[in-house]
Image: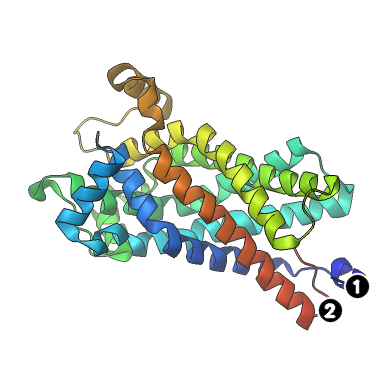
Amino acid sequence: MSASTQDAKVPKFVNFVTGGMSGVIAQIATHPMDVLKIRMQVSRDTLRDAAFRTLNSSGVCGFYSGLSAALLRQLTYTTSRLGIYTTLLDIGEQQFGYLNYVTMISLGMTAGVIGSFIGTPTDLILIRMVADENLPPENRRNYRNAISGIFNVWKSEGFSGLWRGAIPTMGRAAIVNGAQLGTYTRAKMLLRDTGYIQNDIPLQFTAAMMSSIITCFASIPVDVAKTRIQNWRQPTKPPGVIAMIIKIAKTESIISLWRGFLPYYSRAAPNTVITMIPSRTVVYVACLTRPAVKPL
């Protein structure tokens, strides 16, 4: 890559467009793992039980339950978080030069919190559409698609009901994005600086796999609590995220807080790879066709 290309600048909107596009591609590829993770978290099913239950009740199509909500979530949450993160990273590097690991994590957390607040309604609908399979037929919500689900919640629970679970969603996003984006950027810099990997695609792949391990281990307890809160069916108000984590640990064991880790990681690792590599590729193509553009 030429020096002139390296010194060019990316228009801010490109960060958001590529983030949304890569998020959609990643979601389509990894959605079955998302479905299994959610169904394990709202029940006591093992991965095998969740897979066979889905296959027996809905066939292969069951692994793509809630896809419309998942894609709409990518167009809101992922577009926002990646666009905000890369924009903040660009501004930070322009103003201060080299950014340390703590700063990268802080930028990732900030982007994640803002993006997750924007995407909470679609996340809520996704959880409910996927979790319907674990409920008796008479208790299912039966949302036809993401849009009908949003209007159904708005009508039955009020506009604020669309943001049920927003706090744990934002807490999870802070952990996920701080660990994922910050660690991904730092790992990529470390691998490049030490000379272990110089080729761009293997570099991004290795950095994505490294960041996914840390991200999943740190964030899944909050993810389990968030899923339970958003799928709450009791007449009483659901507990807060900390109370829910304590409740799960007491009634189901601490290990239950990592329920669904395998599908969670199986989704997160390729999701991170697919999200980051197409994003960079699109911007790189833009660099070749527009000299004033700088790659991520």
Outermost residue toward the bottom in this view: 289
Hey, what amino acid is under mark 1? Ser
Hey, what amino acid is under mark 2? Pro
Q: Is residue 177 visible?
A: no
Q: What is the quadrant of the N terminus in the image? A: bottom right
Percent position of residue 259, x then y: 36, 33
Circle 1 residue:
4
Circles 1 and 2 in contact, beta carbons < 8 Å: yes
| Mark 2 neighbour class, 10 Å CA radius: few under 14, some 14 to 19, many 20 or more | some
Residue 227: quadrant of the picture: top left
Element class at badge 1: helix
Circle 2 residue:
291
Residue 134: quadrant of the picture: top left
Outermost residue toward the left in this view: 138
Percent position of residue 251, x then y: 28, 19
Q: Which residue is located at x 72 percent, y 44 percent?
A: 187
